Amino acid sequence: MRLSEEDPCLVIGVGTSFTKDFQPKFQIMLPKSLNSAIAEVTEVISDTELRIKKEFGSEKVIAKIKERTATEQAEGTPGLAYKALPFIDQAEMYRHVYSSLEQGGSIGIFPEGTRTMGLYAH
């Protein structure tokens, strides 16, 4: 994929299946080498075009994306790799949490992440 030269919110695919892989509210994520930039999809126009809600980042980030795209194309790759991230509606989960709490129940929250023992050493 690459960004349109005229519109940084228009994503152009080559040999892509955007109509199958994306829906509005899904997110498109770029590779780690581009800081895993993410943008929300607002419209799937065709298999090779989709519109994102706002640019992937600042002008500097957009310039880096375009530079990386040019490098990929010069090396024979049609564009940047990407991942489709489905939209997950959290509303049902929150309804269940509030209902459980109203009925005297409780919830457990398990934060994701790791800790390093070195942080706690004195």
Image: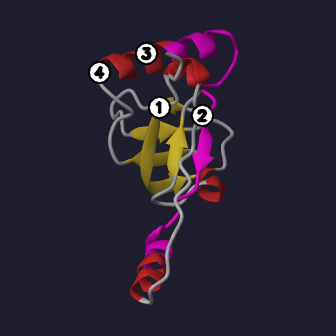
**Vertical placement of 94 versus 24: above or below?**
below
- Estimate the x, y position of residue 60 in percent, counting from the top left: 33, 16
The residue that disc 2 covers is 114
At a point 41% along the width and 40% down the height, the residue shown is 10
Tell which circle, 3 or 4, labels the residue nearer the N-terminal end. 4
Query: Is residue 72 located in the magenta-colored stretch of the structure?
Result: yes
Magenta span of residues: 68-95
Q: Tag count in the figure? A: 4
Q: Quadrant of residue 81?
A: top right
Q: Amino acid at mark 3?
A: Lys
The residue that disc 1 covers is 37
Q: Amino acid at mark 4?
A: Glu
- Estimate the x, y position of residue 55 in percent, counting from the top left: 34, 36
Tell which circle, 2 or 3, labels the residue nearer the N-terminal end. 3
- CA distance separating discs 1 and 2: 23 Å
Tell which circle, 2 or 4, labels the residue nearer the N-terminal end. 4
Q: Amino acid at mark 1?
A: Ala
- Estimate the x, y position of residue 48 in percent, counting from the top left: 57, 45
Tell which circle, 1 or 3, labels the residue nearer the N-terminal end. 1
Q: Amino acid at mark 2?
A: Thr
- CA distance separating discs 1 and 4: 13 Å
At a point 51% along the width and 23% down the height, the residue shown is 120
